[in-house]
Structure formats: C-alpha cells, structure tokens
Image (tube, rainbow, N blue to C red):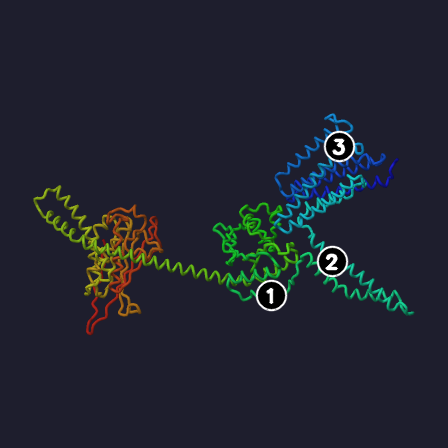
Amino acid sequence: MNTSPTLFVLLLLLGALYLPIIFFAMQRRDDGHGASIWLAASFALIAMVLNVAEAIEASKGSALPFQEIQIYVAFTLITILMLAFQTFMKHENWWIWVGVWILWMLGLALILTNALKLPDVLWSNGTLTLQRERLGPAWAILGWLIISISLVLAISNENKQARQQLFRNRLNYWWPTVFLLFINDVLLFSNTFIAGQPLRLMAAVLMAYVIGTHNVPDLKQIFRRLLAYALISIVIVGVYAAGYLLLQAVFGTSKNFNPLLAGAFIALLLTLMFAPMLNLVSRAVNNWVKGDQYNPSHTIHKYSESISNILDMDRLASIAVGIILEAMQIERGFLFLVDSDREADGHKTYRLRSARSPEERQMIAVELDENGIIASYFIREQKPLLQYDLDLLPVFRSASPFERDWFNQLHTEVYIPIFAKKQWIGLLAFGPKLSRNRYTNEDLVTLGSHANQTAVALENARLVDNLMRLNNELRQARRALEKNNRDLERIDQAKSDFISIASHELRTPLTVIKGYTEMLLEDTNLDPNFKQIMNSIHDGTIRLHEVMDSMFDIAQIDARSLKPHIQPVELGHLIQEICIEQASSIKERKQSLTIDLPNLPHVKSDPNLLRKLFHHLIRNAVKFTPNNGKITVTGHSIPAIIDLPNGGLEIVIADTGVGVDPNFREIIFTKFYQPGELGKHSTSKTRFKGSGAGLGLALAKGIVEAHGGRIYVESPGYDEINFPGSQFHVILPLSKLEDGEEQKTSSPVKFQV
C-alpha cells in the first residue's frame, strides 16, 4: 500500500530542518568548542540522512521495516551525544567512548552476519521465545541504555562540580536535550513509531544551541517567569469564575441582571488588581525558587552615603565590599588597587594589590601587561568581566597561565574595573551569590554603578595611603641617612685620627733621615756614586716631609686647632716668590706663567699658611695643564660689601688645563680626592696629571677658611682633549684698621716665567 504524498513531503521537510543546524555549527566551529560543534553537525547530518531515507522508504510502502535501522542509528546518535558532551567539557578520555561504540558495532556485526553460527531460536520456555533475529536490536538497545545512563551520570557530576553559575546554567541545557532524545528513543524501542522523529530534531537543535552559544538564557529565570505567569493565570481564571458565580448567585434572579456587564465588571476589577497580584505572585515564586530580591537604587544610595567621606584604605575596603555583599547576598568580595608603572622603554604594566583588609592580607599581587588580553580588555571596554568569559571565550586563550591561575585562585565570578579620570585605579571582584543564581545584566549594571561611586572615594583614599606610605619611606630614609651620617662621621674621625697620628709619628724619623742625609751630602770625601744615591734619598725625604706637613696641617684643620699667626703680608711679592720656586717645573713642562697684579693692600694673615696655599694652587695648575699650556695669576681689590665689611682681595689663578667637572666643584676640595682613574696617574710632582696625596686643595680650603675667606673654582667642564681650563678664586678679607692706622699697599707685580 502506497503512503500519501503528504507523509513523504513531511518527512523531507523534517529532514530539511536539520540543514540550519549544520550551517549554525559551521559558523560556530571556532568559538572554543570546535570538536563538540562538529559532532553536533554530524548528529544533525546523520539524522537528516535517516529522515530522507525514511521518506524514500515510506514512498515505497510501509516504514515499519525501517524501524530496525532506526534502533541501530539511535545507538550511534546517543554515542555522538556522549562524545559531544565529553569534548564540550574538554575531557581527555573521550576516546574511550569511541572504543565502546566500535566494540559494540563489532558485536552487532557478528550478530547480524551470524558469524557465531547461532540457531534461529536462542531460548524458549514454551511461552516466551528469544529469536536470533531480535538479538541485534536487543544488543543495540543494551548499548544505548549503558551510554544513556553514563551520560546522565556525567552531566550530573559536572553540574555538581561546576564552580561558575553561568556555566552550571549552560550545563542545565543538556538535560532537556538528553530528555527529548530519551523520550524519542524509548518510543522508538516500544514500537511507537513517529514519522520523522521530531523529538530527535528538537534534541539536535538544543545540542547545537548549547554548544555554539556562549551566553544562554537563565533557565531558572525562565522557569520563575513561566511559573509566575501560570500561577497568575490560574488566579485570574479562579477569581473571574468565583466573581461571576458570586454575582450570578446574588443578582441572578433580578430582571436587570446582565451576564455580559457582570463579566465586564469582573474583568475591570481584575485589570486593576493584575499588577499587585503579579508582584505578589512573583515575590512568592522568587522566595520559593530562591530568586534574588534587592532594590538597586536603594543599595546604590546607601553605598554612596557610606563611603563618601572615608579616607582610610582599610576601612574603605571593608565597608565598600561589605555593603555590596550584604545587599546582593554575595559569598565573598575583594577590592584591589591598581598601580600603573611605565618602564624606560615605554612599556606599561598594571600591578594589582589587594586593599589591606584582614581576609586579603595573604593575597599575592599580580602584574598585568598592558598588551595582555585581560588588561587591554579592562582598559578598552571599561566594563565588567565574568570569570565564565575568561574561562571559555576564545579571545582570552592568549592570557598567560600565571594571570589565569591568579584569577582562578580568587574563586570569584565577576570583576568590575574602577576608573577615575580615564585611569584604571581599582578592581572589585565578587564570588558567587548565596542563592546560587547567576549574575544578571541588572546585577552587572548595579555593580558598575557601585564601581563608579567607589572611584572618587578610592582616589582620595589612595592619595592618603600613598602619602602615608611616602611618609613612612621618608622616615626610614631619614633614619638610614642619619645612620650613614654617623658612620661617615666615625669614618672621617678615624681618618682624621690616622692623619694626626701619622703626621706626628713620622715627623721625627723623617727629620732624622733628612738631617743625616744632609750631613752626608756636606761630606767632601763622599764617593760621587754614593752622593748621587744620597741626593735621591734626600729628595724623597723632602717630598715625604712635605706630605707629612700637609697631613699635620689637615689634622689641625679637622681638629679646628689651626690658628693663623696674623701679620701684614704683601701678597704680590709672596706669590712672585712661589712662582720663582716653581720656575724649573714650569720650564720643564714648556709652560708659561704670567703674574699681573695691581697695587694691592696688605692683608693681615699668616704668611707661612698663605705660602702653602698658593704653592698648592700653582703646583696644581702646573700639574693639570698640558705641555705648552698657560697659567696666569691676576688679582684685584674688592670694595666693602655685606660679606666683606672692610673689603678684601681676590686672587685668580687661571690655567688652560683639563678643567673641572661642574658636578665635582665642591668634591675636589675634600681630602684624598683624585680626578680621573687613580691607577693611571703618574707619581711625579710635575708630570702631566701627576699623582699626589690628594690633600692640596683640602689644605687650601682650610687655610682660606681659617682666614675668614672663601675659595671656589670655575670651569666649563672636564675635558682631556680640548682643555677648557679652570679658574681658582681666592678671596681674603681685609681687617678693620685701628685708629690712626693707614692701609698699606704693595707695588704692582708683573712677572713672567
């Protein structure tokens, strides 16, 4: 008997409905569940081919012989569903189910081909008979049952272990998928043949949807709304019926009773009562199924009032997070401060550190790269990020394992960035709700509003916190500096003690050596060879004696016991004598020295100390000026000013030498300072850049300051190639004249070597 064309068209139409599922799967194949979405497409393709084959078979006659093939395909489809779920959950042991299917299909092949030579009747008790031809479907149904039970247990176990509410909600979509396929196959196995298997089509749609859709609607919310509308519908019908019956019982005997007006009156009352009844029923349903109930505007207002004047970071973190946890019934929450740091190469990082509340003290800070996917998301989008999205969205796959582990260890579900003046300054993180419901869009908007309210308070608290931390660092730095100063003072005192002891202890043996060498040199009978040796010993002794004299003077300066023996000094002639003493060294270096001093008043000072002062300055000029260089000594009188109430003298010793680094203009006057690399200096007193004890300029400064004067240097810089030169300025004050005393002046001095 031929089937009607209508059934044939219906079967083809049901088969064609699988095509959108296949196209949908192909579009979503790169959304993080590639293998499972391809399995969903395979499920739809096999079901579609089966529907087309069923339509062709139905066009020939009855579709009942095709039922056995449907049973074998049902076993394959439930296996594909199990594989899709395993790959959806990223399980590594999905191949086990492939092995089970292959093993079962081998068994089915053995049964269908009768490779085991089984009899036609396998078992019979007279009433019931097990025939060999029914063994194949029974074997397929047994495999289907095993995989179905395993799939139910797997979904249940994953649902219990799921940490994110959004992912648990997505897992719940597998239940109707399995349920629809289960009902479809049970009807098939019980010989209740439904043409086209529409329940299987619905299962394929749900499977592709749950795999290929990241944000699926909340099943709990859908259930609450459907339940609320169902209950309100029942209440409305009940009230309408009761009201109509009541009006009919009371006014039905009246001639003026109109049933239409009575129904309209009750409908009007129900219209007025609908909104209050709907709110009442919705609250009852929410309480029953643990729905969230809070007033966002009231929560935000309370939050704003509570944190507006808080400047302490600990208190801000405690109150801000506490209010949100209490109002929205959240399990845990954290407040993180975000510190940005830009390195020398322009690279920027964000350091997340928890606000110092007791529950967060042990949390490790994390640094997020500005080019990393997580930090760039917060900076670019400036909106909440769900841990569910961080775990599953393909865009976050490039996040570093350290960053992913850090966020996972928080056991939170949502992160809300805090921005102030377009700068990322903080992050709120919240765990799951106590009701185990997901975060809705309304929840995220509310949390975003809390973050905006937190921005100003957090910025103020950060400023106070940074100020306190800076004060602590300054106190620590000051204590360290004070300790270093004490250590330096002890070191400087030890150095001064060494100089004092060395200068005292070495003067006596040096004097003895100097005396005996001079006596030997005066001996006319001394062998010429020995006389040359004694001359060298004598020169070395004289130089060492000069060093000891300088060390002795430095020791006196450090001990503030250097007391000049004041007397009038004609400074021009004193400088000329010193230059004459240096003439041999100057000629040896092929340098020129010029003295150009005008009439200068006599200065009351210690002539011996001034001789040492200018001796060191002129010798330094010779030493640090290259061959063929020039040295000039000039001077002038200074009129009375605030620092020099009686006037003064200024002597300038200029050279064309290596100069002085501007950063070292004060350091060169300290003890033992040597310019350049000490190991490369020569040991000669007159050779270019010759080494010395490093006491000359320190002694010069001490002598000038002992006379109440000032010494300083001017130079463009230190340069051993271009030789910018330097000018050492010595300013000596003039003493106040006694009554009747006249200021004596020296004659001009013009001299050249």
Residue 443 x, y percent position in the rendering = 64, 58
Circle number at residue 302: 1
**Whole-percent x, y for residue 393 in the image:** 62, 47
Q: Are marks 1 and 2 in contact (CB under 8 Å)?
A: no
Q: Nearer the viewer, residue 181 or 599?
A: 181
How far is mark 3 from mark 2, CA to CA?
A: 49 Å
Q: Position of residue 550 (x, y in %)?
A: 22, 55
* Residue 444 percent coordinates (x, y): 63, 57
In the image, which is nearer the foreground, mark 1 or mark 2? 2
Whether residue 312 is visible to the viewer of this picture, yes or no, is yes
In which quadrant will I find the N terminus? top right
Residue farthest to the bottom, as pictured: 739
Report if residue 133 is visible in the image: no
Nearer the N terminus, badge 1 or badge 3?
A: 3
* 3 and 2 marks in contact (CB < 8 Å): no
- Amino acid, disc 3: Leu
Tally of numbered tags: 3
- Whether label 1 touches label 3, CB < 8 Å: no
Question: Is 337 left or right of 20, judged from the image as shown?
Answer: left
Q: Secondary structure at mark 1?
A: helix
Kindly identify the amino acid type of the residue bearing the numbered disc 2. Ala
- Residue 135: assigned label: 3
Q: Which residue is mark 2?
A: 228
The one of 175 and 302 positioned closer to us in this rendering: 175
Q: Alpha-carbon distance for marks 1 and 2? A: 31 Å
Relative vertical location of residue 101 with respect to residue 215 in this rendering, above or below: above
